[in-house]
Image (spheres, rainbow, N blue to C red):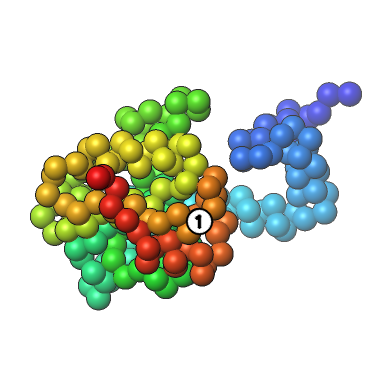
Amino acid sequence: MKNPPSLDQLISALKVLPGVGPKSAQRMAYHLLQRDKAGAEKLARALDRALTQLTHCERCNTFSETTLCNVCADDKRRQDTLMVVEMPADLANIEQSQCYDGLYFVLMGRVSPMEGIGTNDIALAKLMARALDGTVEEVIVATNFTAEGEATAHVIGELLKDKGVKLTRIARGLPVGGELEYVDLGTLAQAVYERRGLTR
């Protein structure tokens, strides 16, 4: 028996989420429609609002509803250090660790040739402009310790080499293959405190 087209559309839409295959998407769709219509409506409204109201912060590239996000707008933060992370979830996790009081730049991805993501697919040009704006003295590379994160760190190191800014990399207090979003706060704080030079 064929599904109604609207149900097929919903299942197909849910499959765009990471880690969600056809069976999981189908279960989610059935649950939302049969057991939690209020939740489905809330999800639809939240997604619509996010799509219409969110943009990127002019300075750090994270999601924001205003020109500057709340971190970039905070004049009490150190203006001379810039921590580069892959995704907004990484920024949020570092903020929760309360180990860093500078500013950020969010790449919104990482170099991953296996996924067809090259250097032009993440915000490296915007990072360069931000890192070399005359106020930044240290760039802390806090990409994940995965093959893609290391490749991204290498690219950033090459781009900023000999450009007059101190370049450091967070220490390997994090497990190899680990992602910032899932690391406990104490380990994350230690990695930031023990950061090291990226180029030798």
Q: Quadrant of residue 160?
A: top left
Looking at the rendered structure, the kind of residue marked 1 is Leu
Residue that lies at the very extreme toward the bottom in this rendered image: 76
Q: Is residue 117 above or below residue 79?
A: above
Outermost front residue:
200
Q: Is residue 172 above or below residue 121?
A: below
Q: Which residue corresponds to the image point at 61% horizontal and 50% vertical from the top-left? A: 44
Label 1 neighbour load within 10 Å: few <14, some 14-19, many 20+: many
* Depth order, front residue of 126/172: 172
Left or right of 160 in this view: 107: right
Q: Residue furthest right?
A: 1
Judging depth in this view, the residue of 150 and 83 nearest the camera is: 150
Where residue 182 appears, x then y in whole percent? Answer: 57, 56
Quadrant of the snapshot with the N terminus? top right
Residue under pointer 1:
174
Relative depth, front residue between 32 and 198: 198
Left or right of 123 on screen, residue 32: right
Q: Can residue 14 be seen in the rendering of this structure?
A: no
Which residue occupies 45% across, 26% down? 113
- Count of residue discs: 1
Kind of element beneath mark 1: loop
Give whichever of 5, 188 is nearer the camera: 188
In percent of the image, x 39 and y 71: which residue is there? 99
> Would you place residue 198 above or below residue 121 in this image?
below
Name the quadrant containing residue 101: bottom left
Q: Residue at x 42, y 73 (%)?
A: 98
x and y, in percent, of residue 65 in the image:
37, 58
